[in-house]
Amino acid sequence: MPETTNAAFRPIGPAALLSPVPAVLLSCRGEGEDSPANLITIAWAGTVCSEPPMVSVSIRPERYSHALIEKSGCFCLNLVSRKLCRAADFCGVRSGRDVDKFRSLGLHPWTPDGFDAPALEEAPAFLTCRVRRILPLGSHDLFLSEIENVYVKPDLLDEKGALHLERADLVSYAHGRYYGLTREALGFFGYSVARPDVLSRRLAKDGPHKKERRK
């Protein structure tokens, strides 16, 4: 078929341009508690299944953390807040072969009971992940992993135990830059088809944020 053209678009060639993506700090160590803990910034990470809950992370084979995860078979995915943004960048451009990133950044590893990989104590939330398969893809290997548990800071939960991730002040990554997320929600899942009473009730919950913006 002849190639169609549209003056509104210009092709730039194949590229990993899906944006934005979550900026996450992966924490890991090799086999054994005496193995040093390491942090690596991961941009190629995403949810792949809800039952069971699973994620994928893609890492170049030459990265220091690649071998550590191969040996231990597990890792933690730490969500990155605005306060951790500079640390996330540092961990993406420095190798654990050369520097102890936890010590250099004044951060602290913490290992959950019954799990073999450390988490980042300063993170607002983290996921404990167990590797199920490793798929060589090309420049990166994909670690297909099951989420065993999720830990969140208490201040992200309201009095009823509901999770409010907008309080975490999370960071996203798009085409080489980090961006903060606003607390203003543009909608909620299903809002396009919600009944008027449900819509007004849910949107009313944004009242405090609207007041903040008017100040």
Image: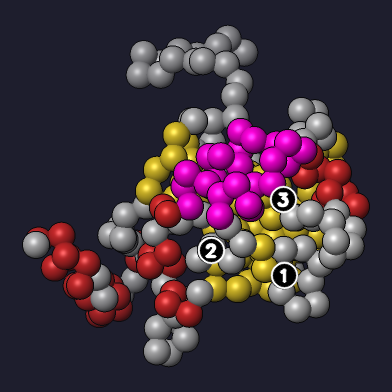
Disc 1 target residue: 111
Pinpoint residue 86: horizontal percent, then vertical percent: 47, 44
- The quadrant of the picture occupied by the N terminus is top right
Foreground residue, 24 or 33? 33
Region of the chain picked out in magenta, as a range: 84-106
Res 177 → quadrant: top left
Q: Earlier in the sequence, mark 3 or mark 1?
A: 3
Which SS type dominates the magenta stretch? Answer: helix
Task: Give the CA separation, mark 1 to mark 2.
Answer: 13 Å
> Element type at marker 3?
strand
Q: Secondary structure at mark 2?
A: loop
In the rendered structure, find residue 122 and report the number of the disc placed on it.
Answer: 2
Report whether residue 51 is seen. Answer: no
Callout 1 crowding tier (Cα within 10 Å): few <14, some 14–19, many ≥20: some
Mark 3–mark 1 Cα distance, whole angstroms, equals: 12 Å
Q: Quadrant of residue 152?
A: bottom right
Q: Secondary structure at mark 1?
A: loop
